[in-house]
Amino acid sequence: MLKINDLHARVEDKDILKGINLEVNAGEVHAIMGPNGSGKSTLASVIAGKEEFEVTQGSVVLDGEDLEDDAPEERAHKGIFLSFQYPVEIPGVSVTNFMKTAINESRKARGLEDMPAKEMLKLIREKSEMLEIDRKFLSRSLNEGFSGGEKKRNEIFQMAMLEPRLAILDETDSGLDIDALRIVANGVNKLKSKDNAVVVITHYQRLLEYIVPDFVHVLHNGKIVKSGGKELALELEEKGYDWIKNEAVV
Amino acid sequence: MAYTEEELKKELETKEYEYGFYTDIESETFPVGLNEDIVVAISKKKEEPEWMTEWRLEAFKAWKEMEEPEWANVQYAKPDFQAISYYSAPNSKPKYDSLDEVDPELLDTFKRLGISLDEQKKLAGVAVDIVMDSVSVATTFKKTLAEKGIIFCSISEAIKEHPELVKKYIGSIVPQKDNFYAALNSAVFSDGSFCYIPKGVRCPMELSTYFRINQAGTGQFERTLVIADEGSYVSYLEGCTAPSRDENQLHAAVVELIALDDAEIKYSTVQNWFPGGKDGVGGVFNFVTKRGLCEKNAKISWTQVETGSAVTWKYPSCVLKGDNSIGEFYSIAVTNNYQQADTGTKMIHLGKNTRSTIISKGISAGKSQNSYRGLVQVNSRAENARNFSQCDSLLMGNDCGAHTFPYIEVKNKTAQIEHEATTSKIGEDQIFYCNQRGIDTEKAIALIVNGFSKEVLNKLPMEFAVEAQKLLEISLEGSVG
């Protein structure tokens, strides 16, 4: 589904990604781990098409199509979803209104009519129940005054509403207490299917106890330096990132 | 698609004026220039009684002695008042019995503006008194209103048919000599609307007027007078669009509202005068005086959405004369490219237990300057007066400006005055977040702006709110996609 070939990217004059290769197939869960500053969040932003990052070499290919010329919203329409590490606030725009706009814009891109209100309501009810979200929450301004946990849960709620082909969860576990983490992880697990894929970006192994990856990749200094199964995450937790850093040097 | 700060700015600059077309209707236009003869000629043209002619001449005398104010935070080349024609009327005979008689091209203009009269008629009872280049060409729903004793007509008609009401109230809140533009308006006003709601009557429909400038180089001097008698209620809608012009067009309107004991007036405006090109050439000068008087337990609510004009100078105000009276001001002012707006309100607390609320939302983009200027004045006899003011500014890009000039004058110790102000900026992060959810940049800006303006949009009547929302999008949209 997703194929990243020798991807190099920079921001301003700083090279951050230095040759990433990654293949993600439908039905798979991949975890990308790595120390701070290794390029994890940059990778997520580049896949989503954030303009401030300049791709200097290589490609991101989704379902056989190179995404190079696609705007972020076009990538979203093709099924890429990014759960943000720091979701932004949009005062005065309710969660419901935001979701309605997002869904209808995606439908428009596919040549479909707006989703009928009744259907939209049903979808909202279904997904909010799944993620144990209070209905009152949906009328609040997007992320405004939300706690860290609420923000992350809201991200997963949006993922549930948009049903992406490829979901990238950028540090979704940061700022979550154990209960919120369980709810969020359960949500992701319920949304997982043989047709979609999930890329979990995380610093710690903790989230991977709940969202069990098929593959773990370790990112260091802009490159994937090690790949393996879920046991790699445990090994990493035990030995620390220095182990990888030293190994990379060798 | 790109949306860096630089590109965002570019997108916002490239907005074309949507209603920039010109209707070719034969008009009768006065020669340019202003003197006593022109004032008399206007009065004659409108078949006005002598007292009205005298009133105009008084105003003209005062105006000649006055100077154009310079205290506002706007810069523009002052209009040459001798280079303007002060009267222009569509040549087709005014007053039609049915729409069939109306010039088809005029009707087409209305359609392009989205103001199909047929549609309006069907819509939840909106009576439309259309002012096109100074003369009312169509008035609808008059009958229904007449049954309730409500008078809704052009001011010219009111001067002839209801002189006692006009004589009593015209200039009572905005005197002829109030300010430079009000004096000019008093001398040369061409037409406008008049509305009277009798005692205890609740006006069953929103009263609506669409203004429109249509002749090149013609100044517009509308005069509106709304009188709500004791215990009555009326909601009045005013909306404007204007065609593109290279030369500056002057618009100096006067609106007077009188809310007698226990009456309530809700006055909503959507203003979309031609803002000038993206290079700052052309555009309407909008110098408006709007003021309302509240008697005992009365309430006046101004709601405005302003997206147009090259230069705006406008302060819809409330004189809270009666005890327990209430004044409200809800405003959204959008400026883009080289637009300049100096707008706000005055709340004058004279009576006891008077209350006022001010919610102002300024949105600046391009190289525009957007100023809020507001006065809250509490008189020495105004016991327990209360005011709450909130001024929020939203900036787009790095070349625009937002300014707040709140004036508070309190002469009574029991007053409670609150003022809050915020300034924020649309961030690239907000736009990327929306993009990532499949919402393009143009739609994202509209969403963010609508969210920012929500408190005020909510105060507009339903159909008007939809229109206003559309207008906000048009005003800020770029050439994306």
Image: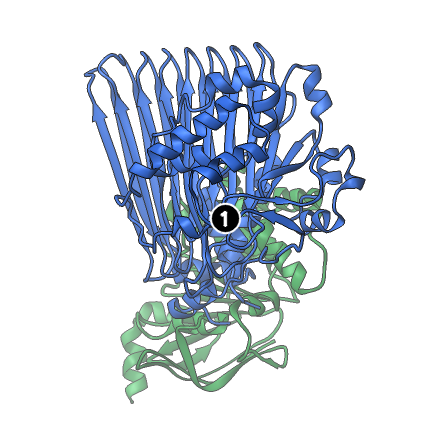
Chain colours: A green, B blue
Q: In which quadrant of the rendered image does the C terminus of chain A lie? A: bottom left
A16 w.r.t. B332: above or below: below
Q: Is residue B203 left or right of residue B249?
A: right
Occupied quadrant, residue A19: bottom left
Q: Residue at x 49, y 70 (%)?
A: A48
Q: Is residue A197 left or right of residue A111?
A: left
Between A174 and B316, the one lying in front of the other is: B316
Between B310 and B345, the one lying in front of the other is: B310
Q: Is residue B227 left or right of residue B401?
A: right
Between B442 and B178, the one lying in front of the other is: B178
B286 w.r.t. B126: above or below: below
Q: Residue at x 61, y 33 (%)?
A: B208
Seen from this angle, which residue lies furthest bottom? A250
Q: Amino acid at mark 1?
A: Ser
Q: Is residue B315 left or right of residue A193?
A: left
Mark 1 closeness class: few <14, some 14–19, many ≥20 residues within 10 Å: many
Q: Is residue A211 visible?
A: no
Q: Across the whole image, how many numbered discs are drawn on residues? A: 1
Q: Is residue B398 visible?
A: yes
Q: Determine whether the residue tagged by mark 1 lies in a helix, strand or loop.
A: loop
B38 w.r.t. B170: above or below: below
Seen from this angle, which residue lies furthest front? B37
B460 w.r.t. A47: above or below: above
For disc 1, the marked residue is: B85
